[in-house]
Image: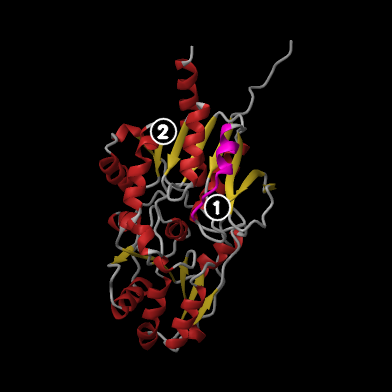
Amino acid sequence: MTTTSKPALRIAMATPRFFPLAGGVENHVYQVASRLNHQGMEVTVLTVDPTGEMPASETINGIQVMRVKGWPQNRDFGFAPGLYRLVAEGGWQLLHVQSYHTFVPFFAMAAARHARIPYVVTFHGGGHSSPLRNLARVPQRALLRPFLARAARLVAVARFEIDVYGRELRLPPEHFTLIPNGADLPQAPSPTAGDESQILILSVGRLEKYKGHQRAIAALPHLLEREPRVKLRIAGSGPYAEALQQLARDLNVAAQVEIGAVPPERREEMAQLVSRAALVVLLSDFETHPIAALEALALHRPVLVANNSGMKELADQGWARAIQTDSSPADTAEAMLAQIRNPYQPAEMHLPTWDECADGLASLYRGILGNSAESQK
């Protein structure tokens, strides 16, 4: 008697950017794709190369990646007509669109509808440094509504998305599934006695204006008046780097500021950096489900966030101290100092893990494909 194993589910994840490019969505896709592959699925990442210099196909840490050319060069618009063919002719059983705010979802969802492939969408709303791009988000979602309404399910990573997007798009809560991001970094070694001459503040995220790193730099002169041992480390890369460095020079705090990314695949190194921090700050204009803050909480670091979007949910649960986004540099420094000297200590805190996130997606995919098979009988 011979047994045959069930064929792996063939899942395509369409996303505007992927490793080696770094960012929150890129990390999310990597974390869930690698885990779903380990569960026996066959997940392929379909993405865009705006530079024209990346390989069209490669394997990154076990994840098959396929890229198509995108325009304009070195911008994140994601105008990539070649994505339509990859989706329509790939023989996928399900498409997962990861983030909505470029041309990628238009091409991907249109191709899926043409090929009669069920699809799900995770918004990954985020912010943007361009005021025009931020203003375009609402009409962009309105244009996408016919596609979103036909999605097998919309995945929210934060609870407020279900209320906000459901009301805006006139879609019922049942059309959404809440599957939060994971929050777990590798466990770092126990901190050593440390350098008591330095108090490290860490600001994590891509170097874009909307990420708010400049707010931490602006607060530094006021903070140094009260606590001269403070050093600020900004962990990220991106187009706003020179502006941040210039601001530090203008405020005469360049010697107390270090800017540099930790490569996304070096998770242990990131865990060690977070573990050394006396405070982790996230002062963005908008974060759907702030992975950097959650990872810091998972390593028991005090966190200070801007009181908006998904960061407000952390503060409302008592997990982080929050300040208003437009707080003055002096008030920001005061809040930083308070969270260092008298940090909020959550009594109970169950943080979602990447395993739980991947398990939730696997269950969702199987449910959709099971229902699809039943409907075709």
Which corner quadrant of the image does residue 290 belong to? bottom left
Indicate whether residue 83 is drawn in magenta.
Answer: yes
| Mark seen at residue 151 | 2
Q: Nearer the viewer, residue 175 or 364?
A: 175
Q: Nearer the viewer, residue 158 or 21?
A: 21
Which corner quadrant of the image does residue 32 belong to? top right
Residue 162 percent location from the top left of the image: 31, 42
Residue 217 versus residue 15 in the image, above or below: below
* Residue linked to disc 1: 17
Residue 259 versus residue 125 in the image, above or below: below
Residue 86 percent location from the top left of the image: 60, 38
| Residue at left offset 68%, top offset 48% | 56
| Residue at left offset 40%, top offset 85% | 224
Q: Is residue 61 left or right of residue 21?
A: right
Q: In the rendered structure, which segment of residues is drawn in magenta?
A: 77-88
Q: Is residue 1 left or right of residue 124?
A: right
What secondary structure is marked by label 1?
A: loop
Residue 209 percent location from the top left of the image: 42, 69
Q: Nearer the viewer, residue 344 or 293?
A: 293
Residue 361 percent location from the top left of the image: 48, 36
- Examine the rendering and report whether any part of residue 15 can be seen: yes
| Residue at left offset 51%, top offset 65% | 274
Crowd tier of the residue under label 1, counting other residues whose Cα lies within 10 Å: few below 14, some 14–19, many 20 or above: many
Pick whichever of labels 2 and 1 is earlier in the sequence. Answer: 1
Give the amino acid type for the residue marked by disc 1 in the picture: Arg
